[in-house]
Image (cartoon, rainbow, N blue to C red):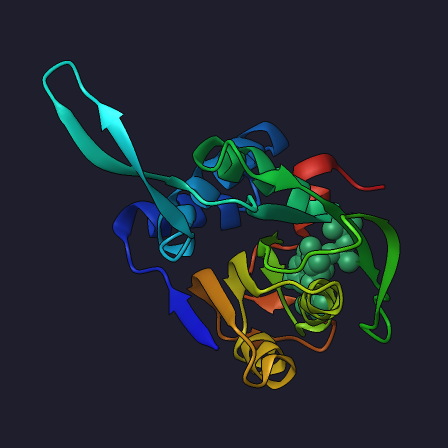
């Protein structure tokens, strides 16, 4: 598994505002979108492209286009939805599938409550998006789900992760093709399974408490 932790002052600046408990939901949503666009630069580094011939106003030359089958972006509901716009702006030809997952706040076990994805993901490059990698249970289950459907490789983009979460994804990935791109690697999990220092409950901060 490849792990990339961002190291860029713009990303750290935007994450600092996101972490601040005084940041309102509209600003939080805007920053989440901007952050995923910045992280997508690294996350899409290995997106498959095919050569094409193009004609400029001056001459004919070779370029590339994103290969078929098109990549698929999978936001993990609910909080992952906040990252969708930022990624599809950069990958406008991608398809979008949805996975609804919620973790039990006592046991931290994730449950899948919704799924809208192609039955066959053979040869598809998948981009799973979820702002928070805490115990790793939710993302590990999501990645396993995509591989069970035949995904070729999975790149996950999270705004914040923990060492525990990264280890959980490493353990589930084994020798499969998984890339993890993080905005920051935080210190640890607390006893409530929250990321420390973290930013609190990402879904609540994006959409309010439900
Ligand atoms: C949050 C977050 C991740 C998960 C991370 O979702 O968006 O999906 O928790 O925790 P884990 O790494 O320990 O599994 P939550 O279950 O709160 O649902 P929500 O997106 O609907 O708020
Ligand atoms: N889910 C969140 O939204 N925040 C955390 O810190 C952990 C899990």
Task: Return the residue found at the far top.
Answer: 57
> Residue at 48% across / 37% down in the picture?
91
Q: Position of residue 29 (x, y in %)?
A: 57, 34
> Residue at 11% across / 22% down in the picture?
59
Total marks shown come to 0
Q: Is residue 14 above or below residue 125?
A: above
Of 177 and 21, nearer the camera is 177
Q: Position of residue 194 (x, y in %)?
A: 67, 67
Q: Judge from the rendering whether residue 123 lies leftward or rightward of residue 47; answer left or right.
A: right
Of 145 and 56, nearer the camera is 56
Q: Where is residue 82 in the image (x, y as percent from the top left)?
A: 62, 39
Q: Where is residue 132 in the image (x, y as percent from the top left)?
A: 61, 59
Q: Give the image quadrant in which the ligand numbered 1 is located.
A: bottom right
Q: Judge from the rendering whether residue 165 lies leftward or rightward of residue 150; answer left or right.
A: left
Image quadrant in which you'd find residue 94: top right
Q: Is residue 112 visible?
A: yes
Image quadrant in which you'd find residue 147: bottom right
Of 76 and 147, nearer the camera is 147
> Residue at 58% across / 65% down in the picture?
152
Q: In this view, does 200 lie above or below 73?
A: below
Q: Is residue 160 above or below residue 176?
A: above
> Residue at 63% across / 81% down in the picture?
168
Task: Return the residue found at the far left.
Answer: 58
Q: Judge from the rendering whether residue 162 lies leftward or rightward of residue 42; answer left or right.
A: right
Query: Quadrant where the C terminus lies?
Result: top right
Q: Can residue 197 be seen in this view?
A: no
């Amino acid at each position: 598994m490849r792990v990339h932790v961002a190291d860029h002052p713009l990303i750290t600046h935007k994450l600092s505002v996101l972490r601040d408990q005084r940041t309102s939901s509209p600003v939080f949503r805007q920053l989440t979108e901007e952050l995923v666009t910045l992280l997508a630069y690294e996350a899409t580094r290995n997106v498959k492209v095919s050569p094409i011939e193009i004609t400029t106003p001056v001459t004919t030359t070779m370029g590339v286009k994103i290969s078929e089958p098109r990549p698929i972006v999978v936001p993990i509901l609910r909080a992952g939805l906040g990252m969708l716009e930022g990624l599809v702006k950069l990958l406008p030809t991608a398809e979008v599938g949805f996975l609804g997952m919620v973790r039990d706040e006592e046991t931290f076990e994730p449950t899948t409550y919704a799924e809208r994805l192609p039955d066959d993901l053979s040869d598809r490059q998948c981009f799973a998006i979820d702002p928070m990698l805490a115990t790793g249970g939710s993302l590990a289950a999501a990645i396993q789900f995509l591989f069970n459907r035949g995904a070729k490789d999975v790149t996950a983009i999270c705004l914040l992760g923990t060492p525990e979460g990264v280890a959980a994804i490493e353990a589930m990935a084994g020798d499969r093709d998984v890339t993890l791109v993080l905005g920051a690697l935080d210190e640890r999990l607390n006893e409530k399974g929250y990321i420390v220092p973290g930013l609190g409950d990402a879904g609540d901060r994006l959409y309010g408490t439900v």
